[in-house]
Amino acid sequence: MLECLELRSRARPFLRLLLFMCVLTFLGVIYFFSYTSSVSYMKILHHTTNLETDFYNTVPETYPLDPSANQTDGSREGYLVWSPSCRIPDIDPWHESIRHFVSRLEPIVCSDLPPLSRVIGHTLQLIHANSHLYGGEKSFHCCYQEITRRDADKFYPKADDNFSVSKCIDFEDTVNLTSEQQFIMVKCASVTWFWFWEKNIYTNLHAVVSIRKDIKEKLQNNLTPDRQRMSVLIVGIDSISRLNLIRTMPKTVSLLQRMGWVEMKGYNKMDDNTFPNLMAILTGMNYTQVRKECMQTNNDPVDECPFIWKKFSEKGYITGYGEDDPTIGSFNYEKTGFFKTPTDYYLRPFMLAAEKNTILKDLDGLHVCLGPTLSTNHIYKYATDFATTFRNNLYFALFWMNSLSHSNLNTPSVLDLRTLKFLQDLIHNGVLNNTFVVFLSDHGMRFGKIRETYVGWLEERLPFIFMWMPEWYRKLYPKKYANFLDNRKKLTSPFDLHLTLQEVLYGEHDNGTQSCPNCVSMFDEVPWNRSCNDVGVTQHWCTCYEYRKLTTQDISVQSMARFTVGEINLLLEDGRDMLENNTQCATLRVKQVVSVRSKVYERKLGYHDYVILFETMPGQALFEATVRDSGQFKLLDTISRINSYGSQSKCMHNAFLRKYCFCV
């Protein structure tokens, strides 16, 4: 009996230790399950593969959750932006995952023959030195026509497509154009042996920045910049990311860097395509606000929207706007455009006439040549002439190009030398002495094979933007210039750019817009620890997060894909009244999940966010969505279509739903 008691006494310390270890283990399990609150997330993590590429291994897996931790100036090697709230990686433009998509294109030749006509100053000339290439001067005759736009008295949906062409007037040498003549079309024809039939051998168009009577009156109170205000020139090229500009236009980038243009490396788009991103810059409004306040439907013109060029015009600035492809114009594609001429100088009638009257050369479905002239050359020449004409006055101008960048990752390489020349012309003509210049894009490539990669996902959301301010302005406002330099590696958005333009116009002013209360002018010190929410960018478009690649085979991932497809089908169901008669959109099903990534630092927030890419059938559409799992799935913003759909959706009249519909 005593031996038994003695044995129990010796066993008690061991039992106490065992009991303590059990309690500790139990508490650890409870903590782990509370830390990873989502059962689905635990299942996925169990099957998690290694990080997606070697690139991922160069960055930390999580952020500090305490915003006050690790205070810094917002700069760290390996990042474009670094803060507790936002970390955008600095990726090699030639990253191995996308390198095989990149190539350089040969220059595009619109005509084997040199031009027969030109405009120098305000004089239209035949180029006699080239006439022998067209059969000799005696074998053809030429005439010119004036292209004009007269605003309609009453609104109709095609008002912005309105232009008129005058009678063709013969000329043999030169014509002195009047100050009211802006757009000229030259036609030359040869007489065949059928004397009654002429063959057109040459058609070309010329845009002239003439100082009309109404402009002279406006200039009376706007003779010269007063060393307090700058002119504004915005030049945009569609669908070029910061990285793709480096890859495709190295000579242009080299000049910008050598001259000291300021690049905002953390500039994040705020919505899907051109229209909302430009509207954020020009009006300070997001798409929802635009719909509510000034363009309720696509059948309404955009005239009532508060474009910032209206405010510049009220202050005496000469205004101008032009794009190279009128079919997919920023305010015209699937929209009505402008009822009244929006700016003092408006290039759309000229481009419409060129598109209708010249031999077109297409590339990737867009008109790159209008007769013997690249469509982008028309824009660059007109922008140069406009800025040069008004270099000693105050002006606001926006010029935009789509045709050589919208549909192909590599076609911008064709623009490198021409863009370089454009910038050199601005320098040589003294334009940069008084002008605040913004050279930018709206977003990166939105579809194509590169978009199936993580690098392509980032590029779509991070367009390039470079800005220039005159030397005298830097000296007059050294703090503003210092802020500009300090903001280069901070998160910014189109709403910040809108406020920057307001400061150019008004000087000091209140920051914030209705769509982005926390946005600030880039002349001010941008807060270093901004989140996407602070700059008006939704979660789906935000690049501030780091991700871990997950397996696509998990049941939870498959459920997420089915949920997202279900949301697409609900949208299509609601849009049935927008279909052609006797047509319908197929009910989509998940064919395969291509990839899924999780945000790795939000596991303490009670939910988990994923980016999922999947293919559907019928139609082989590739869709990408940002989905939140908090016990049930929730879409964060829209669902992106990242491959082209061509005529698959021709039965759907709604532009937004077209990317989802497979017509049957």
Image: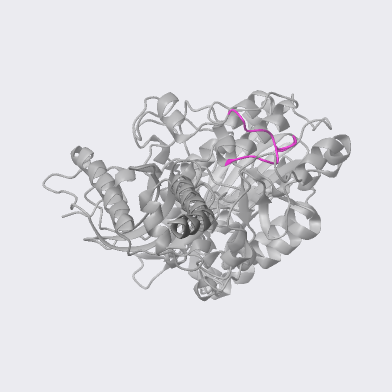
Query: What's the residue at 36%, 50% (across, down)?
Result: 39
Quarter of the image holding residue 630? top left
Quadrant the C terminus occupies: bottom left
Quarter of the image holding residue 250? bottom right
Give the x, y percent position of residue 497: 64, 38
Q: Is residue 337 visible from the viewing direction of this image?
A: yes
Q: Residue lying furthest front in this view?
A: 1
- Seen in the picture, residue 515 relative to 39 is either above or below; the reply is above
Q: Residue lying furthest right in this view?
A: 475
Query: What's the residue at 44%, 24% (across, down)?
Result: 293
Q: How many marks?
A: 0
Tell whether position 48 is magenta: no
Tell whether position 524 is magenta: yes
Which is more toward the observer, 235 or 625?
Answer: 625
Give the x, y percent position of residue 459: 54, 58
The segment highlighted magenta reads: 517-531
Quadrant the N terminus occupies: bottom left
Q: Give the dominant element type of the magenta stretch: helix, strand or loop.
A: loop
Query: What's the residue at 50%, 57% (across, down)?
Result: 6
Which is more toward the observer, 497 or 398?
Answer: 497
Give the x, y percent position of residue 112: 52, 74
Q: Is residue 204 visible from the viewing direction of this image?
A: no
Give the x, y percent position of residue 479: 84, 36
Q: Residue lying furthest left in this view?
A: 582
- Seen in the picture, residue 138 relative to 119 is either above or below; the reply is below
Give the left or right position of residue 512, taking residue 375 as reference: right
Q: In the rendered view, how is the structure colored?
A: one colour
